[in-house]
Amino acid sequence: MIGLDTGNLTGHASQVLMVVAVLAGVWLLWTVVRYVLADKGTRVSMRQAVRVRWGWVRLARMAGLTVTDKTPGLLAQITASKDGPTPAPRVLTPRIKVKPDPFGVIVRAKTLPQVGLEEYQKAARFLADAWRCTRVSVLPDGPGRVVIRGVRSDPLTTPTEHRPTGRPPEDVARWELGVDEYAAPVCVSLANVPGVTVAGTPGSGKTSGVNKFVCDFAPSPSVQIAAADGKVSRASEGDYADLGQRMFAFCGDDLDEANALFKRLVELRKRRSSTIRDVLGVKNMWHVGPSPQWPLTVLIIDEAHTFFREYKGSDAETKRLAALTAENARLVEDLVKKGRSVGMLVILISQKTTGDALPTFIRDVCPVGLSFAQKTVEAAVAALGDDIRNWPDASPVTLQDPTYVGVAVMAMQGRPGYTRIRTPYVSDADAARVAETTSHLTADPALCLDALLDAIGWAASGDDEPNGPLPPSKPGAPLKSQA
């Protein structure tokens, strides 16, 4: 009986070893396949990840990321004898998980008593040297955990391209700008944001960043876009020529045309403000979100100083232009200060956003501000606020090298200081492709509002009460009528 049991045990052991060998072979094969299919940067990072895992215990001890536990473990307590020696203290090392990517490694580690977030942050420079990284950041990753990001190559100096998918975004309030200096995605919420300012020297990447915005949101019928471009005279010219098919309105540097466009949007804002509670059943559109019937209406004003500059002179034409630009400023102020709750967003682009280029009563109420390269500290302060003086390493003044074309600086909620962002480049061919394939989604928001008011029986004069509020429609639903 004992011999039979031993034979069965030996047979089971052989089966277990066979299963372990098969699983190890599958894992090794999968690792080799991943390595072969990976790009060059990821392959280097995969080798780096192996070094990080193998050297972690020793490195953690040298960097002060271990703790000595003088209490014997459970096994030591059971096996220890009363007259025997006291069990030696245990040195505890945090456990880690390492994930490679094209720029470096992401290490998720646990904390220990006396080894928390602050201790990891103090050791960041030692980890960077040991892992041969350009920089290392440490951020909290939930209770008892931290995430350590090590980048081997600088994402800010690595140009990237973005190819629009042509699919509607999952969240029309989410603007994906690019990646930060640790290659982490940077997103901005546009919910309840009335205005965005974008500043930077010519050729620094301002318009390219806005082109990505248009291409990403063009496939959504819940977003409608208009533009006023102060660099050109006709829609067929300039940076937005390929995107014109997806814009319900466009004007060039003609002040009269721009004034007419701004008036048109202010009138839309007034009509939305007076009908929103009866149509959507809420006071703030963002409580139900944009829809094709009530789309987020975006006005892009490029080279904004063209439409707001002060004209000085005594002749009749100069006085007329001065009055026109003053009215333009008043109209855009109306949109920025009153358009948030009814789903209207103004993106103002200018080489610098100082008071002489962009009126401060407009600039200072825009909660989101980006700045590409700047030549002077004064221009950086105008774009990002006076606090940028306290963060000289993040100042856009340091981005004048051609290597940093497409890199912007902004203040992010929940992060101290300022964040530098690499925005990807979108080719003209891709922009034209997206605009052409989504041109059928272009609709005048005023006509969409007319269709809504007709659907609920709103009288044209506005004197009669509607039959009741229209339930918010799901994003992507077709318009009930199109005037």
Image: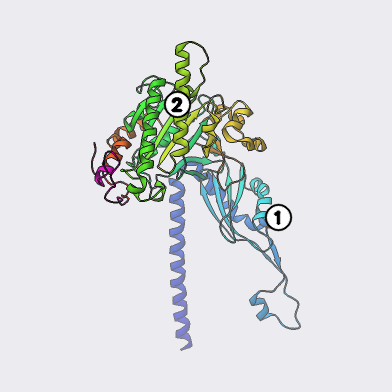
Seen from the viewer's position, the closer of residues 166 and 18 is: 166
Task: Classify mark 1: helix, strand or loop.
Answer: helix
- Whether pointer 2 and pointer 1 mark residues with C-beta atoms closer than 8 Å, the reply is no
User: Residue 216, percent across and down?
Assistant: 39, 39
User: Residue 214, percent across and down?
Assistant: 39, 35
Q: Earlier in the sequence, mark 2 or mark 1?
A: 1
Asked if 196 appears above or below 15 in the picture, the reply is: above
The answer to whether residue 3 is left or right of residue 474 is right
What's the residue at 62%, 34% (across, down)?
A: 395
Q: Is the magenta stretch mostly helix, strand or loop?
A: loop
Q: Residue 62 carries which label?
A: 1
How far separated are the C-alphas under marks 2 and 1? 64 Å
What's the residue at 41%, 27% (across, down)?
A: 228
Residue marked by disc 2: 328
**Magenta stretch, residue numbers:** 453-471
Q: Which mark is residue 116?
A: none
Residue count near mark 2 (Cα–Cα under 10 Å), binned few <14, some 14–19, many ≥20: many
Query: Looking at numbered disc 2 in the image, what kind of residue is underneath it?
Result: Asn
